[in-house]
Image: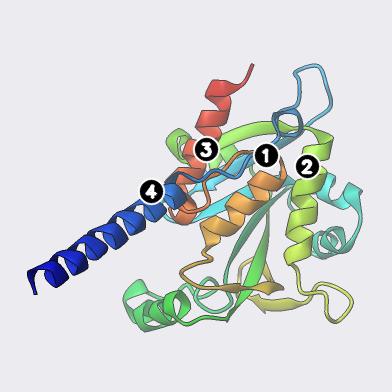
Amino acid sequence: MRRGRRSRTGLGALIAAALVGLVAALWTWTTPGDPIRWRAAADAPGVELHLLDNGFHTDLAVPRAALEARGGPLAGAVRGLPAGDWILIGWGDAKFYVDQSPMESRLPDGARAFFRPGNRSVIMLDPVQRDPRALFAKERRRSVRVTPAGFDALAAHVERSLDLSTGSPRVAAAREGDDARFFASREHFSIVRLCNHWTAGVLNAAGLPVRPARSIVSSELVAAMDRAEQTAP
């Protein structure tokens, strides 16, 4: 009996150690970027981008002119928006992300969005006229000039997320008195695929190394851009 107990104890310890190792590996796992694509040289063409962090959710501010000049379905969606030189791009659950009612009344829907698999999602395109740097405090925003190739890869990543089953981007929601439009996305929202995971993927397409598991929080994306800045030649 003692030998059996020892065997079970040893097996349990081995499984626990393996689980700890797996969690540690996922937590530190980094999806490589491309520094050549990510950062444009000072004397070379580039496109200015801004990461905006409200404390739990991140948006990207992208020049409208660059999106429209690229062409394609995403450019078509942007051309239909109200005036604004910058476009804020974000992603989230098709209902919870759009709803702006008091948070306490939205908690049950938030639980649904987090824990039910297969939730519909939307891409927000919000035109703004002001410089995005004026919208957030310095500690809540980061900026970079990506190469034209990096910008094209970023825009292509966003475009692939659009639901084009009807042939063109489809507005799934809009808010009264708000210029933002929420376009149907082909992706699904849940605890394993949150808004910041999506934005991390968009930035990674542009060349930024990201840690997917840690990107569950918005501060990790800010940290990723800081790390890239520190290691830049």
Type of amino acid under label 4: Ala
Numbered disc in front, either 2 or 3: 3
Type of amino acid under label 2: Phe
Residue 174 lies in what quarter of the image? Answer: bottom right
| Residue bearing the label numbered 4 | 24
Task: Answer few, some or many: residues within 10 Å of disc 4's Cα (few below 14, many 20 plus, some between 14 and 19).
Answer: few
Position of residue 100 in the picture relative to residue 200 (left or right) = left
Residue 175 lies in what quarter of the image? Answer: bottom right
Looking at the image, is mark 4 or mark 2 earlier in the sequence? 4
The x, y position of residue 20, in whole percent, is 32, 54
| Residue bearing the label numbered 3 | 224
Q: CA distance from mark 1 to mark 2?
A: 9 Å
Asked whether the residues under the numbered discs 1 and 2 touch, taking CB atoms below 8 Å apart as contact, a structural biologist would say yes
Looking at the image, is mark 4 or mark 3 earlier in the sequence? 4
Numbered disc in front, either 4 or 1: 4
Q: Which residue does the image show at 74% across and 48% down from the upper left?
A: 154
Type of amino acid under label 3: Ala
Q: CA distance from mark 4 to mark 1?
A: 32 Å
Q: CA distance from mark 2 to mark 3?
A: 18 Å
Looking at the image, is mark 4 or mark 1 earlier in the sequence? 4
